[in-house]
Image (tube, rainbow, N blue to C red):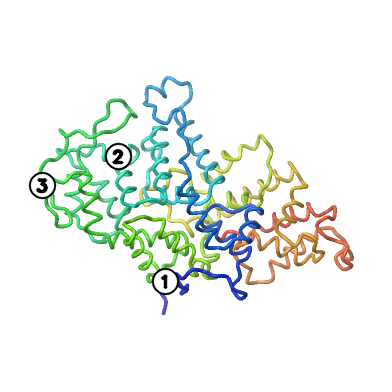
Amino acid sequence: MLTTNTSCNVASLNIYSPTNSNPWNRQKVNHLYRRLGFGATPAMVNSALNQNPSDLIDSLIDEALNLNPTPAPAWGYWIKDDFDARPENPFEYRRDWKNQMVADMFQNNLRDRLTLFWSNHFVTEDNTYQSPAYMFQYYNLLQLHSLGNFKDFTSDMGLSSAMLIYLNGYENTKNRPNENYGRELYELFALGVDNGYTQNDIVETARALTGWNEREERWGPITFDNNKFDNDDKTIFGQTGNWDYYDVIRILFEQRPQQIAEFICGKFYRYFISPATNENIVSQLAQTLLDNNFEMAPVLRQLFKSEHFFDQKSLGVHIKSPVDVQINFFKDLDFELPADFEFNNKIRGGCQELGQELLKPVDVAGWQGDKDWIDSSTITTRWDRIGWYVWRAWRHNEEQFRVIGKAITDENSNDVELVSRQIMDNFLSKELISATEYSQGLEIFKDQVPENYFEDGTWNLDWETAPKQVYSLLQFLITIPEFQLK
C-alpha cells in the first residue's frame, strides 16, 4: 500500500514521445511552461505545439544556460557610506530589486524559475543583512549558478556576504566558534536532516569555517582573516587535517556524494513533479547527477523530457504559490495594462500579502509551500487580488478580452459550450472531474445573450457581447478550487 508521501506516478524517465493516445497538446504545453517557467502567452503555446517536445525542452534549458545575469544596478557594490550619502532609505533599493526579480520572472523561463527555487534552498532573509548591495550580490549568485554545478554553487554561496551575515559566519572565530552555518550546510543545504553527519561533524566543521570575518567598511566585502582562523587539526567525516572552508566543501562532496545527490534530486522532484516522491525516479536522477560531477543541467534535461514529467498524475498536484497564481495568470492572458499600473510593484506586494515575500522566506528552512500557501484568509485574498487585476485590464481595454478568447479557442466556433470549456481549460492544469463547474461557467459565459442566438449558430466570438462574456467567465474561473492548482 502506498504511503501518503509516495507518488502514484509510476511512469518512467524514458523520453516522452507523443502518440494519438498521449498527444502533445495545449494542456501539456501549459504544464511545461508553468513548471519550467511562469506560464506562456498564447503565441508561445501555439509556437510550442509545432515543435518536438524534446527539442523545445533542450531550447529552454540552453536558453537558461546562456542567459546573462541581470546587470548590476549602480548600487550593486556600494558600501554603507555610499547609501548614507543618498536621500533614499536603503529599504527602497531592496524593494526595487525585488520588483526587478518580478520582472525577471515574468520575462524569463527556467533560469528565473530556478532562481526562485534556490532562494528557498540557500535561504537568507534580507532584513537580517539589510544591505541592498548584499541582496544584489546574493541574487546574482542564484542566477549564475541556477542550473550549473551544485558543488561550485555550494562553495560560492557559503562565502557570500548575505550568507555570512545571515548564518553568523561573520561571527565565527577560533575563540568563539559559531555552529550555525555548519549545521545548516549539512541539514538544509547539502544532506538533509540527520542524513550522514553527526554533532561532532558540525562542531569540527564550525572550526574549519572560522576566519571569514574581515570587513574594512560596513556593508563592504567580507574577506578572510588568518588571525581568527582555527589552525589546529579537525576531524570531519572521518578525515583529519588542518581543514579550512574549501577543504570542508571538498570533503563533503568526496565523502557524502550519494546523500547529496539524492537530497538535491529529491528537492527537484518535489518542486517540479509532485510533493509526494517516487524514490526510484529520484535515485535515477541522483545517479545522473553523480555521473555528471554535480552538473545539474543533465538532470533537468532527463527529468523534463520524461514520460514521468508529462504523466497525467504530474498535473494539478501542486498548489500555486503567490508568485505562480499572479504571474502565471498574467503570462497566460498576455494582457495590456494601464501605464500607471506598476505591474512589478503590484505583483511583489501581492506576494508579500499572500505570504511569499521575495528574498525573505519565513525562516532558514524556507517556505514549505503547497498546503501552507492557502488558508481561509489567503484564499479570499487571492480571489480579490486576481479579480481586481482582471477588472483593471477590463477598464483599460475591453476588446483584449475578445482577443484572448480567440487566441485560446477555436476562434470561429459558434459552439458556445465548446468555447466556454476551452477558455476554462486553458487556465486549469487538467480537465475538471465534475461537470458542475463547467455548467456554471457556461451559464455565466452565456451572460445576457438570448438563447436562440446560440441555437441557430448566430453567435461566435465576434459577437458584440463576447468581450464581456470572456471577462465574466474569467472572474468566475478564478474562484473555483482547481484554479489554485498547477
Image location of residue 173, percent across then percent down: 18, 38
Whether residue 59 sits left or right of residue 124 in the image: it is right
The part of the image, by quadrant, that contains residue 474 is bottom right
Alpha carbon distance from label 1 to label 2: 36 Å
Is 280 in front, or is 3? Answer: 280
For the N terminus, the image quarter is bottom left
Alpha carbon distance from label 2 to label 3: 23 Å
Task: Say which label, 3 or 1, has the lower sequence index.
Answer: 1
Q: Residue at x 41, y 74 (%)?
A: 3
Residue at the disc numbered 3:
233
Task: Say which label, 2 or 3, has the lower sequence index.
Answer: 2
Q: Secondary structure at mark 1?
A: loop
Q: Residue at x 62, y 75 (%)?
A: 20
For the C terminus, the image quarter is bottom right
Image location of residue 159, percent across then percent down: 29, 40
Residue at the disc numbered 1:
6
Three-letter residue code for mark 3 = Asp
Alpha carbon distance from label 3 to label 1: 43 Å
Asked if the residues shown at circle 3 and circle 1 are in contact, with their CB atoms under 8 angstroms apart, the answer is: no
Image location of residue 316, percent across then percent down: 55, 64
Three-letter residue code for mark 2 = Leu
Q: Secondary structure at mark 3?
A: loop
**Which residue is most to the bottom?**
1
Asked if the residues shown at circle 2 and circle 3 are in contact, with their CB atoms under 8 angstroms apart, the answer is: no
Asked if the residues shown at circle 1 and circle 2 are in contact, with their CB atoms under 8 angstroms apart, the answer is: no
Q: Is residue 462 above or below residue 425?
A: above
Residue at the disc numbered 2:
164
Image location of residue 241, percent across then percent down: 11, 49
